[in-house]
Image (cartoon, grey):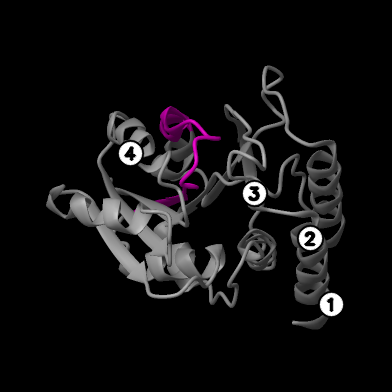
Amino acid sequence: MLLSVLIPAYNEITSIDILLEKIQAVPINKEIIIVDDGSTDGTRERLLTFSDIPNVRVIFHEKNQGKGAAIRTAIQHMTGDIAIVQDADLEYEPQDYLALVKPIADGKEKVIYGSRFLNPENRHSYFSFYVGGQVVTLLTNILFNQRLTDEPTCYKVFDANLLRSIPLDCTRFEFCPEVTAKVAKRGIRIKELPINYYPRSIAEGKKISWLDGVEAIWVLLKYRLIK
């Protein structure tokens, strides 16, 4: 079993080295696909030095296109049996891969989401982000007959063939609601498992905003009612 770790990266010079070390420390057969999305803070130059690492592949976008576009590029290059999305910050714990991939590796599930809310020890960031995430999750459950607690989670894990088969149009943070909607419309019930979460502040580089929550609601409605 080969795990494809898909990493969209934009201006993450302070975290990219530590993140790679943490991922490499996970005792699982993996390939790491990093898509630099037009970074201007030195991330691009640092990633150029990763070319000699055997299980790491780096692809460069000449201009910033957005998280969704970077994930779509990573999907085109993955060769694994299972795929997981990993942000380039340090909010999530790669050691959680082991539990998240097991139900898919065992053939019991096609999609696993890591829920920040199923772990009571986690703290959460801004109240507005918390409320927005809960609204998006509730709407997802209503529109697509799911029982999720954390739809906007970064840790989304897929049978790789399933992920390859899903046509995605996203460019920015709307990757999450789009892929969730399209998985659900195939009749797949998404299973959740608890994960660890260490939120960072906007000052530390958090990029998502309340406007992305509004866009997520529109995307969910669009794929339920229009497409």
- Real-space Cα distance between discs 1 and 2? 11 Å
Circles 4 and 1 in contact, beta carbons < 8 Å: no
| Residue in view at x 69 percent, y 49 percent | 152
Residue 19 image point, x, y percent = 38, 37
Indicate yes or no whether the magenta region holds residue 139. Answer: no
Relative to 194, say whether 168 is above or below. Answer: below
Q: Quadrant of the C terminus?
A: bottom right
Residue 17's disc number: 4
Q: Residues within 10 Å of mark 1 (few under 14, many from 20)?
A: few
Q: Quadrant of the N terminus?
A: top left
Please give the residue where the numbered disc 3 appears in the rendered image. 190
Please give the residue where the numbered disc 2 appears in the rendered image. 144
Q: Is residue 186 left or right of residue 72?
A: right
Q: Disc 1 vs disc 3: which is toward the camera?
A: 1
- Of the image marks 4 and 3, the number of the one nearer the N terminus: 4
Please give the residue where the numbered disc 1 appears in the rendered image. 225
| Residue in view at x 25 percent, y 57 percent | 57
Q: Amino acid at mark 2?
A: Phe
